[in-house]
Image (spheres, grey):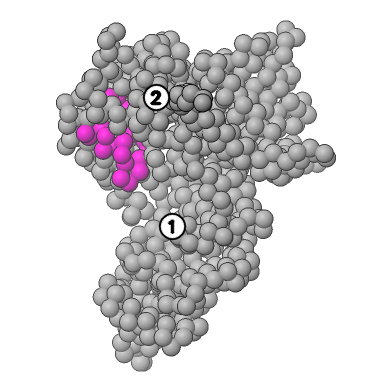
């Protein structure tokens, strides 16, 4: 008799199921070719981060002999074995998609990856000149002595392993490594009369290895790529200077162990054995691939200019109907609370709030949290400008934002030099909340304008991620926002907020209280319903709370984009719970929570997913949205996502996903398409109303 399955789905396997759903978009023949190529690149980028963060940590546990099981009952070794099996299958499917489907179709459309032996004489001459003048001067081969440590190669870079002919009279193999230069474009465009033809940089270098090793016969060579463990953190109790300690973490990552080796399948057994031995890689962490390595680089091809017929129709973010085109952002917020749904509605009002505050002589102070920003952030520039204009500017910069540490260190230093008061958050916690406060002197006194968000202050990702912005000058929200900032920037003890809740103190207990309230109402015979939109649901206690609600008969509908450790539809456990995941052109990133509350619904936005790290080890915010218009807008977003039958996948009790399809005689509903249409219609109606309002009345000439 088989063992009863765990009530929890393994977190890592759930994430891999998410990446499989992304890969399904690359496999979808109904999408334009370059859109499919983009999704293929995303799956590769996702796997890179997965190995650096999740697999690296599991390997350390397995190496220590840890037999501790996760909530699903799997040990680290068992998880690694299943991860290896699934990822090997996934990478095989990736390359089948690329080589047997996408590349032939792209070549027919004029986008062709060339091989060196397929060049015309003119192209061959061009490439040879390119190598001699631009590549050869920057390439530095590294001889590898078997008795010496392997060269310290950066993670995720492309390298060539070269085997040279043994010295006469010896049988000792000789190897060298050539790191493909990162400062040179990976895709080299070659002259052609039409279309876009390109070579891979490593293919060009391979063709000219004899010039890099003159007089040394080359036996064979192959590209390879290593992934290093990035699951490292700062011991903040021993970190006197957090900025310096974070710099040390960045260096430590460059020295960390190799958790994955990718090598071209053309590599000889000798090359493969040499690399696995030198890098201490086991077979389950070795991925022999038909090339090219690093499919994430194809994002550059997928997003290049031109070939619009191979791309999806662009959806331009629309202006909010609540903000006039020439209206001050302060006037707009003072008139009513504003809720924006990005990227369907433009992120510009959020930028405008900070930029207008920087230039407004009536603004006294700006307080803001920066978790991730763009490379040339207009928000950071505005904050520096505000400080230069003698406004009191306080910025909490989260140095521990994974893979953005270097950028955040740079911004923190630049802001300090500009006169901004920079705080590095709370010791032992990541500050992940999204909030900005502007303090302004007005004729009626001091007024505080507040922005709460579910996403980062990053105008680039705001065009790619779906997120919520809530802007208000409500006095209770303003008081809460100021109290929250005082808590994380000073020695203030956490206070009882008027409206919001913050992790790690009260957010978890507030969510549990809301779930328990629905349970109690259902027991009293009332209607009880929960709707939630999240990126991830992995916290065991909250999963258990939802199971208890389901047992009581509460209707629970969840939209979870990525990791979901809850099993829906299990008899006597989760019969009233349904879970869908949407993968479409925009990354679903907003977090919205709805509780029926006996008909007086409570609706919230949050920076926090329902994961233990968010609830217990991060500074997060839970923000109620009470304004009727804004609340109805959020409920409509939830219901639309939960009703998607085109891009949604339904989670089944066994942890697998099934693509949703319209029921017979039911209309196909694609949530993101509906959101775009609604935003366009709202902007059009607002513009029409504005024209009607301000159209001048012209005199009618007299008759006769």
In which quadrant of the rendered image does the N terminus lie? Answer: top right
- The 10 Å Cα crowd at callout 1, few under 14, some 14 to 19, many 20 or more, is many
> Measuring 71% from the left and 19% from the top, which residue is drawn there?
554
Instruction: Look at the numbered discs 1 and 2 and tell me whether their residues touch, using CB distance below 8 Å.
Output: no
Q: Is residue 196 visible?
A: yes
Which of the two discs, 1 and 2, sits closer to the camera? 2
Count the marks: 2
Residue designated by label 1:
227
Residue designated by label 2:
451
Above or below: residue 197 compared with residue 642: below
Tell me the quarter of the picture where residue 175 sits.
bottom left
Magenta stretch: includes residue 376: yes
Above or below: residue 54 compared with residue 206: above
Secondary structure found at label 2: strand
Which label sits on residue 318? none
Tell me the quarter of the picture where residue 650 sits.
top right
Tell me the quarter of the picture where residue 123 sits.
bottom left
Q: Which residues are magenta?
A: 365-385
Image coordinates of residue 382 in percent, x first then y, are 26, 34
Pick the front one: 190 or 528: 190
Q: Is residue 61 visible?
A: no
Secondary structure found at label 1: strand
> Measuring 41% from the left and 55% from the top, which residue is drawn there?
228
Measured Cα–Cα span from mark 1 to mark 2: 38 Å
Image coordinates of residue 248 in percent, x first then y, are 27, 46
């Amino acid at each position: 008799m088989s063992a009863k399955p765990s009530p929890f789905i393994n977190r890592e396997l759930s994430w891999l199921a998410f990446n499989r759903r992304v890969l399904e978009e690359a496999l979808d023949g109904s999408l334009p070719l370059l859109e499919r190529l983009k999704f293929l690149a995303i799956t590769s980028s996702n796997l890179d981060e997965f190995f650096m963060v999740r697999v690296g940590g599991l390997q350390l546990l397995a190496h220590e002999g840890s037999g501790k099981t996760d909530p699903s009952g799997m040990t680290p070794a068992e998880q690694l074995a299943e991860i290896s099996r699934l990822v090997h299958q996934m990478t095989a499917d990736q390359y089948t998609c690329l080589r047997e489907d996408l590349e032939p179709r792209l070549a027919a459309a004029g986008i062709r990856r060339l091989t060196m032996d397929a060049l015309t004489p003119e192209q061959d001459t061009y490439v040879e000149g390119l190598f001699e003048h631009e590549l050869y001067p920057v390439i530095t081969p590294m001889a590898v002595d078997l008795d010496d440590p392997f060269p310290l190669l950066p993670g995720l870079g492309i390298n060539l392993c070269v085997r040279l002919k043994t010295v006469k009279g010896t049988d000792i193999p000789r190897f060298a490594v050539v790191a493909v230069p990162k400062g040179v474009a990976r895709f080299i465009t070659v002259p052609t009369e039409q279309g876009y033809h390109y070579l891979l940089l490593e293919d060009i270098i391979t063709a000219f290895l004899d010039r890099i090793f003159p007089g040394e016969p080359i036996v064979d060579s192959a590209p390879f790529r290593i992934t290093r463990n990035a699951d490292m953190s700062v011991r903040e109790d021993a970190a006197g200077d957090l900025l310096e300690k974070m710099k040390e973490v960045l260096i430590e990552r460059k020295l960390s162990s190799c958790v994955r080796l990718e090598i071209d399948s053309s590599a000889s057994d000798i090359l493969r054995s040499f690399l696995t031995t030198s890098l201490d890689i086991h077979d389950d962490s070795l991925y022999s691939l038909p090339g090219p390595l690093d499919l994430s680089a194809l994002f550059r091809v997928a997003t290049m200019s031109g070939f619009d017929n191979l791309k999806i129709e662009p959806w331009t973010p629309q202006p909010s109907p609540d903000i006039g085109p020439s209206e001050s952002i302060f006037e707009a917020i003072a008139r009513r609370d504003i809720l924006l749904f990005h990227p369907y509605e433009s992120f510009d009002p959020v930028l405008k709030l900070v930029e207008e505050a920087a230039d407004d002589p009536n603004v006294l102070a700006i307080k803001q949290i920066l978790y991730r920003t763009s490379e040339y952030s207009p928000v950071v520039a505005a904050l520096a400008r505000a400080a230069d204009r003698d406004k009191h500017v306080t910025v909490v910069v989260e140095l521990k934002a994974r893979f953005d540490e270097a950028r955040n260190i740079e911004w923190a230093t630049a802001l300090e030099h500009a006169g901004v008061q920079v705080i590095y958050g709370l010791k032992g916690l990541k500050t992940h909340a999204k909030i900005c406060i502007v303090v302004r002197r007005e004729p009626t006194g001091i007024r505080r304008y507040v922005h709460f968000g579910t996403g980062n202050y990053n105008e680039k990702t705001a065009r790619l991620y779906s997120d919520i912005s809530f802007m208000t000058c409500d006095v209770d929200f303003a008081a809460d926002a100021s109290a929250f900032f005082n808590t994380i920037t000073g020695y203030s003890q956490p206070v009882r907020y008027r409206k919001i809740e913050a992790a790690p103190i009260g957010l978890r207990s507030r969510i549990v209280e809301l779930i328990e309230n629905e349970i109690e109402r259902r027991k009293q015979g009332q209607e009880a319903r929960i709707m939630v939109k999240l990126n991830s649901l992995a916290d065991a206690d909250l999963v258990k709370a939802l199971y208890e609600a389901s047992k009581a008969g509460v209707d629970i509908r969840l939209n979870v984009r990525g990791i979901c450790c809850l099993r829906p539809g299990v008899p006597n456990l989760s019969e009233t719970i349904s879970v869908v995941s949407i993968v479409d052109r925009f990354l679903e990133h907003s977090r919205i929570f709805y509780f029926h509350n006996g008909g007086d619904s409570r609706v919230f936005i949050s920076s926090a997913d329902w994961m233990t790290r968010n609830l217990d080890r991060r500074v997060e915010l839970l923000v109620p949205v009470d304004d009727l218009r804004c609340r109805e807008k959020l409920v409509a977003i939830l219901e639309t996502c939960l009703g998607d039958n085109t891009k949604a996948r339904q989670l089944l009790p066994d942890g697998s996903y099934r693509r949703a399809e319209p029921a017979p005689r039911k209309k196909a509903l694609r949530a993101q398409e509906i959101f775009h249409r609604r935003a366009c219609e709202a902007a059009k109606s607002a513009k029409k109303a504005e024209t009607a309002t301000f159209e001048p009345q012209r005199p009618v000439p007299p008759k006769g």
